[in-house]
Image (spheres, grey):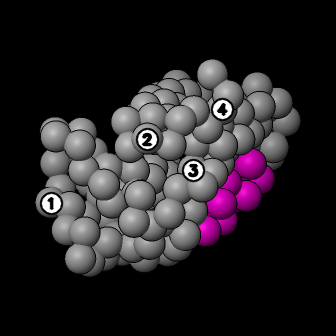
Amino acid sequence: METSFVYGLNFAQSTLEANLREISNEDSMQQIENINCINWLLGHIVTVRQSWIQRVRPGYSFYEPLSSQYRTGGYFNADNANTIEQLLTWQQQQQKILIEIAEKDDIGNKDVFISYMLHELYHVGQIGTVRKLIGKGSGVGI
């Protein structure tokens, strides 16, 4: 069992959930200049997690049309965006799958797994920053 990977996944999850506490769907769509909104950031995390899981579980897919909107460089259309609640539900489902993969030491290339984890943590931090910029204060108490 890769406990360090499980710890990393759980740390990212608890930080993400703290940063999303009291964020409404309307809040998640707020745009600040050239900064990605919280909705896009969470959707991007979900989209990247999908490809992450597909590396070790080929055929896994939850909702293919989601990917184009939340892909790096993709066009974000708030009118067609998923709700923050739906994105978080998908993300939590993926969390269970990723924990299972990490506990079975079935993560494949560990360097790739670490790269995905660092990418996700980067965006979790961005969500915390955007949260403060839209006037919600810190989600993690800092």
Bin the neighbour count of mark 1 within 10 Å (Cα to Cα): few under 14, some 14-19, many 20 and up.
Answer: few
Q: In terms of depth relative to the viewer, which is nearer, 52 or 57?
A: 52
Seen in the image, is 96 located left or right of residue 116? Answer: right
Is residue 89 visible from the viewing direction of this image?
yes
Whether the residues at callouts 2 and 1 have beta carbons within 8 Å, the answer is no
- Can you tell which of label 1 and label 4 is closer to the viewer? 4
Q: Which residue is mark 3?
A: 20
Q: Residue at x 66, y 65 (%)?
A: 93
Is residue 43 visible from the viewing direction of this image?
no
Which contiguous range is marked in magenta? 89-101
Query: In which image quadrant can residue 102 be found?
Result: top right
Kindly identify which numbered label has been placed on residue 135: 2
Dot 1 amino acid type: Tyr
Q: Which residue is mark 4?
A: 140
Kindly report the distance in space between the C-alpha atoms of the residues bearing marks 2 and 3.
Answer: 13 Å
User: Is tag 3's residue or tag 1's residue first in the polypeptide sequence?
Assistant: 3
Bin the neighbour count of mark 4 within 10 Å (Cα to Cα): few under 14, some 14-19, many 20 and up.
Answer: some
Q: As displayed, is residue 66 above or below residue 133?
A: below
